[in-house]
Image (cartoon, helix red, strand yellow):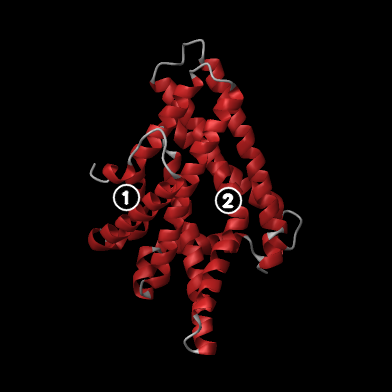
Amino acid sequence: MVLEAFEYPTKQIKKSKAFLNGLFFSSVAVLLSLWIFRDFASLTIVFLTVLACLPFIYTTIKTQEEEDLSDLSETTILKDHAKAINTFLFLFFGIVVSFALWYTFLPPSTTSTLFQAQTNTIVNINNRLAPNVIQSLTILSVIFFNNLKVLIFCILFSFIYGAGAIFILTWNASVIGTAIGNFIRSHLSSYATTTGIAKAGAYFHVVSLGLVRYIIHGVPEILAYFTAGLAGSIISVAVINNSLHTNKFGKILLDSSNLIIIALLLLTVSALLEVYITPLFFS
């Protein structure tokens, strides 16, 4: 695959390069989807982005599984996992920023087709969090168990498909990018209506607000998904490499269990931030 040349899938990759990879691959996916698969673009952009990211994701996961088979301590292995997860996170941010920018600057007639499925998902989420639900004491559990369902899917997809969690995470990136793009576009329109051509600082202010609104609780949430996905992928690669019957498979299970526990803790923190912190800034 030609795009692999831009990926440079080695054992170590800079976070900035991972971010640019996400930005580039998703942008190529947008252009190809609008050009060839326009009627199905909202799903095709996810598929093509995943297709481009898979070699790097799988190479990194394979490296993490090899470390589990080494004689390194569990603490050292978890530190190396943290570096890989941080790299995945920057790849995710690159995809989010790309989709947000495309949504912001493309004509409304184009974005309505390009992000149709994502927009419908956002509407359904908002309907589930209607005022009668938000005012109840169950909002925390609703958000947590909804996110837990996604986390379980990340583990299952990763176990079954190796790097399958990247599909769910790319889909989430497209939904978040759509939400951010819509937030930025609506507020820019408000500025333009009230002040004419607003100052550049006002535009940067709106863009920053759009990102911060979802970053507060989004970072630990996405970290939780990547952590859980890595746990499932490590076991999947171990099975593929016939490590199932080795003495070190128990170490792989222990490492994956630790990753799942960390993911659950991150998911709890994310739900608490979304319910109690984010509304303080964005009511």
Q: How far apart, in angstroms, are the residues tagged by discs 1 and 2?
A: 24 Å
- Residue type for callout 1: Leu
Q: Identify which residue, 188 or 110, lies in the foreground.
A: 188
The x and y percentages for residue 21 are: 37, 49
Residue at 48% over, 23% down: 67
Give the quarter of the image for residue 128. Answer: bottom right
Q: Position of residue 197 (x, y in %)?
A: 47, 86
Crowding near the residue tagged with mark 2, few <14, some 14–19, many ≥20 C-alpha atoms within 10 Å: some
In the rendered image, is residue 153 in sight?
Answer: no
Which label number is shown at residue 48?
1
Q: What residue does disc 2 label?
A: 219
| Label 1 crowd bin: few (<14), some (14–19), many (20+), radius 10 Å | some
- Which quadrant holds the N terminus? top left
- Residue at image position (46%, 46%) is 15
> Which residue is at the front of the view, 21 or 139?
21
Q: The residue tagged with tag 2: helix, strand or loop?
A: helix
Q: Is residue 260 left or right of residue 232?
A: right
Taking the image as shown, residue 52 lies to the left or right of residue 60, namely left
Sequence order check: which comes first, mark 1 or mark 2?
1
Q: Residue 150 shows which numbered tag?
A: none
Mark 1 or 2: in front is 2
Residue drawn at 53 percent across, 61 percent down: 124
Residue that lies at the very extreme toward the right in this rendered image: 137
- Given the image, on which type of amino acid does mark 2 rest? Val
269 left or right of 151 in image: right
Q: Secondary structure at mark 1?
A: helix
Q: Position of residue 184 (x, y in %)?
A: 50, 71
The image quadrant that residue 116 belongs to is bottom left
